[in-house]
Image: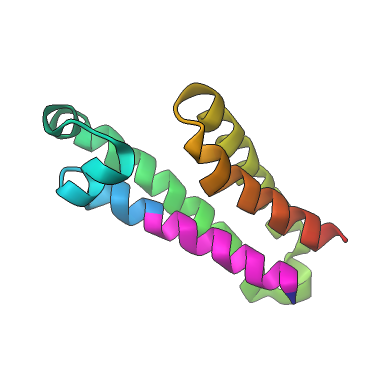
Amino acid sequence: MLATILIAVVAFIHIYILVLEMFLWNTRTGHKAFNLRPDFARNTRVLAANQGLYNGFLAAGLLWSLWLGEKGLSVAIFFLTCVLIAGLFGAATASRKILYVQAIPALAALLALLI
């Protein structure tokens, strides 16, 4: 039960990131969330939308794993591992905040799933 809740939380975090990157990047909300200057946000909006789409795929994979139920164990492990790796890479290269928003929730869900 805990693993299911944590997987859903990670999926919804990535849906929120999708919305921020695809639709709100060039707004005050997007600027604040990612600490962006308006001119930078305007110039990078297409790249951000592409990045948001990938976050959506991660969310879709996690929701698919929940939909599969017990048969979705390997799917959940795969997508949580992808999120964890992306979170670690993002924390190392872009912002330490990504460690807390993305990597730690994925790790918690993965551990809950495996225990």
In this rendering, the answer to whether 113 lies above or below 25 is below
Q: Quadrant where the C terminus lies?
A: bottom right
Q: Quadrant where the N terminus lies?
A: bottom right
Is 7 included in the stretch rendered in magenta?
A: yes
Q: Please state the extent of the stretch shown in magenta in the rendering.
A: 2-16
User: In the rendered view, does 73 fall on the left or right side of 29?
Assistant: right
- x, y (%) of residue 106? 64, 51
In this rendering, the answer to whether 29 lies above or below 1 is above
Measuring 77% from the left and 63% from the top, which residue is drawn there? 73
State which quadrant residue 42 falls in: top left
- x, y (%) of residue 101? 52, 48
Measuring 22% from the left and 30% from the top, which residue is drawn there? 44
Measuring 55% from the left and 24% from the top, which residue is drawn there? 92
- x, y (%) of residue 24? 22, 51
Is 25 included in the stretch rendered in magenta?
A: no
- From the viewer's side, name the closer residue of 33 and 62: 33
Q: Main secondary structure of the magenta part?
A: helix
- From the viewer's side, name the closer residue of 97 and 8: 97
Among all residues in the image, which is located at the extreme top? 93
User: In the rendered view, does 104 fall on the left or right side of 21?
Assistant: right
Among all residues in the image, which is located at the extreme right? 115
Measuring 48% from the left and 38% from the top, which residue is drawn there? 97
